[in-house]
Amino acid sequence: MSTDTRKSSTESEVSGLDYEETELKLGLPGGSRIGGSEPERKRGFAETVDLSLGGETCATDLGDRSTDSSDGPVSGAGRPPAAKAQVVGWPPVRSFRKNALKSCTYVKVAVDGAPYLRKVDLEMYGGYQQLLTALEDMFSCFTVRNKRLVDPVNGTEYVPTYEDKDGDWMLVGDVPWKMFVASCKRLRLMKSSEAVDLAPRTPQGSTNTK
Amino acid sequence: MSEDEEDETRGGEEKRRSPDPGRGGGGGANPPPPFSDQVLENVLENVLQFLDSRRDRNAVSLVCRSWCRAEAQTRRDLFIGNCYAVSPARAVERFRRVRALVLKGKPRFADFNLVPPRWGAGFYPWLAALAPAYPWLERLCLKRMSISDADLSLLALSFPTFRDLTLICCDGFGTAGLAAIAEHCRHLRVLDLIENDVEEEEEEMVDWVSRFSTTSLESLVFDFVGCAVNLDALEALVARSPSLRRLRVNQHVSVGHLRRLMERAPQLTHLGTGSFGEGGGGGGEVEVADLEAAFAASRSLVCLSGFRDLAPEYLPAICPACANLASLNLSYADITAEQLKPVIIHCHNLQTFWVLDTVGDEGLQVVAATCKDLRELRVFPLDVTEDSEGSVSDVGLVAISQGCRKLRSILYFCQRMTNAAVATMSENCQELVVFRLCIMGRHRPDHLTREPMDEGFGAIVMNCKKLTRLAVSGLLTDKAFGYIGMYGKLLRTLSVAFAGNSDLGLRYVLEGCPKLQKLEIRDSPFGDAGLLSGIHHYYNMRFLWMSSCKLSLRGCKEVAQRLPHLVVEWIRDKPEEDDGEAVEKLYVYRSLAGRRNDAPPFVEIL
C-alpha cells in the first residue's frame, strides 16, 4: 500500500551507501543492477501449476480477488508484471499455507479424447470469458466460437463442462461466476455431441456475470 | 512443537570450546573402570535417570569420564538439532539406551524455497544406524527431513514397540509409507503429520486409514495430508480407539462426517476440523444447531483448529466449547472482525490464538479485550504479497499489547507499522520470549514518521529481558543491529531479511550476542568482514545461513580454513549465473562428522 522510501538522507550519510545499492534486486550480488532483470520464476506456489498460462503468472494475481466483470485484459495470461518484481520466499509464508488458502480453486482440466490433464486456478480469472480464453491458450488447437471450443481441423465442437461439489456434471456458464468457482471440482471439455444430457443452458445474456 | 521452547544446548553431543582429552570422552575405547568406580557409576546412574533437561545432561557429561558414561547410559531422549552435526554411528555408540529421538534436518529457510530440492537431510542413514542400535525405540520426531515410503516401511518393521511418530515439514513420502506405519506399528499411539509435503496423484493413493492395527491410538493428525481418506475407515478407527485424545483431519472430511467423528470420540481434547463449510460431498448437510450440540457434548476440548473452506455461519457452532479453549487456530479461515467477535468473546481462557489478518485491527481489539491470558498470538496474511492492502497494522499491535500483558510469543504479519507501536509492546509485554514482526514490504519505514524501524526493535531488545527469539523487518540500519548486540544478551535465534547497511551490522550481532545459536540472514549487505567477525563464536552455534548477501569466496574459504570443525556449504543452485567469486548462498554449521558424503553436485563444501 504505502510505497517504499528508497532512502532518507541520514541513512546514506551513515554508511555512504544509498539504498539503491543495498536494495537487492534480482541479479548477482555486486553485479550491475540492470533494470528489467527477469523476475524470479521459481516460486513454491507456482510449482504447483502444471502449465504456464502463456506468460508469467504474477504473484500479485494470486492475491487478486478482482470482481471486475469486464472481460478486458485477460488475467493470468500475459498480464504485465507487477510494479515490484516478486522475490523468492518473501514474504516468508510456507507454501503449504499459501496453497491451503488457495487450493480449493485449483481444478483439473480434461479433454475428451486427449490423454493429458492440465490444472488451472480458477481464481486467476475474473469471469467465464477469461477462462475460455485461457483454455484456448492452453489447448492451443482450439479456437473459441460462441462460448464453445472448436477444433478447426475437424470441426469438432467441445463444450466446457464441470463437475460440481455434488458430483453432477454441468455446463460451464450456467451459474454466476463466483458460484461456479466455489463449486467447481474439475473441468472437462466434452464433445458437444455427448453433452446433450446436461442441464440445459439458461438463455444467453443472463450468465457470465459475477 | 515450537523451536522457541527448546532448551538450547550445544547439541546432542558434548561440545567444548577447547578439546580436553583428559576429561569426559565421547565414546571410544576406554579400559573398564575399577570396581569402586563402577559402583559409583551405578549409583550415579540411578540418580541421573531422573534428569530430564538436555542442558543439564550435557553439563553432567562434562564433569568427568565416569559421569559422561553414566549420563550416556541413562539418556533416554536424544535430541539432534542438526542431522549433520554428528554421524549416526557416533550418536548410537555413545548413547546406548535411547527410547526417543528428535532429529532435525534442513535449515528453516528451506520452508521458503531458498534451499534447492535434494539438498540433503535424508533420514535413511540415520534409520540404518538406529534400527540395529535401538530395537526398543519408541518415539521419533523428524523435522525438515527427507523420508521415503521405503524408509517408513523399514521404520515400521524395525521397532516392535514403536509408539509415537511425529513428522514436521518433511517430504519424500506418501500414503504408501503411512499405510506401512499404520499396519505394522501395532502399539502406535501417536501419528502426527504436521505441515508435511504430501502430494500424490489420485491414482497412487493408498487407503492408509484402513490399515491401522493399533488399539491404543491417542493422537492422529493429518490435517495437511492432501489426499482424501476413507471416511468409513476413519470412523471405525475412531470408534475403536478409546484413548484417542487428539484428532486433526484434512479438508476432505466434511462437517457431516466431523459430527459423526465427534460423537464417536467425546473424550477428544484436541480437534482439527476438516472442511467447515457446506457441501464437501457425501457427509450430507448439517444444521448448525446439530453441530453446536456436538461441540457442547465434547466437554474436554481444549484445542481447536482446521476450519478450512469455512462457511462463516458455521463458526458460532463452536461457541459451547470456547470457554474451555486454551488454543484456537483460525488461521485458515477468511473471516472478518464481525464474524470473529461472537466466538472470541467466549474465549476467556485462550492462551494460544492463530488468526488471519482478515479480522483486521478491529478483530485484534476484540481479542485484546477478551483474551487476558493470551500467551501466543500469530497473525498470518491472507494475501501473501508485498503490495497488498494489509488489514492489520500498528493499531492492532498496540491493542494486543494493552490487553494481553502475559504475551510470550508473537508472530505478526502486516503492511504498516510504527516504532511507537513496537515500543509500546515492549513496555507492556515484559514476558515476551519470541518477537517476530514481518512488515511485508521490503525496506518499509515507520509509516507515520518515515523513520527506519531501528528504535522499535531497539526497544524490544532493551525492554524484553527474556527475549530469546527475534525476527526483524522493515527499513533497518546498522543501528538496529547495534541495539540487538548491546541488549540481546539472551538471544538465541535471529532472523534478518533486507536489513542493515554494512558489515558493522553483522559484527554488532556476532560480537554482542553470546547466546546466539541460530542466525539466518537473507538479502542484507553483509560481507566477508562481517562473516569473519563471528569466528570466535561459530562453534557455539547450531548454524548460520546467509543468502543474497555480499559474501565472497575468499571470506568463506577463510572461515572454513580457520575453523576445521565447521562445515561451510556453498550452495550454488544457479550455476549459470555464477560469476565465480560471489557466494550467493552460504550455510555454515559445526560438526563432529566432517564434510558430509551425501552432498549434491550444487553444494560445494569449502
Image: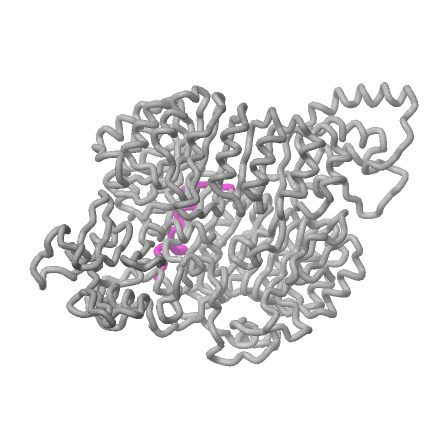
Which quarter of the figure is the C terminus of chain B placed in? Answer: bottom right
Q: Which of B599 and B294 is in front in this view?
A: B599
**Extent of the magenta region:** B389-408
Query: In this rendering, would B355 be left or right of B290?
Result: right
Q: Is residue A199 left or right of residue A64?
A: left
Quadrant position of residue B353: top left
The image position of residue A171, as x and y in percent, is 17, 55
Tell me the residue at 41%/55% (across/down). B394
Name the residue at the left extreme. Answer: A203
Residue B314: in magenta span: no
- Image coordinates for residue A26, horizontal then vertical, percent: 52, 72
- Say whether residue B464 is left or right of residue B83: left
Quadrant in which residue A115 is drawn: bottom left
B17 relative to B327, above or below: below
Q: Residue B386, position in %: x, y?
A: 42, 63
Image coordinates of residue B241 in percent, x first then y, are 43, 22
Quarter of the rendering containing residue B310:
top left
* Magenta stretch encompasses residue B393: yes
Going by the picture, which residue comes out furthest to the front?
Answer: A154
Asked if one can make out residue B418 in the rendered structure from this viewpoint, the answer is: no
Q: Residue at x 40, y 59 (%)?
A: A49
Say whether residue B366 is left or right of residue B9. left
Height in image: A45 above or below B15?
A: below
Q: Does residue B273 show up?
A: yes
Q: Residue at x 79, y 57 (%)?
A: B563
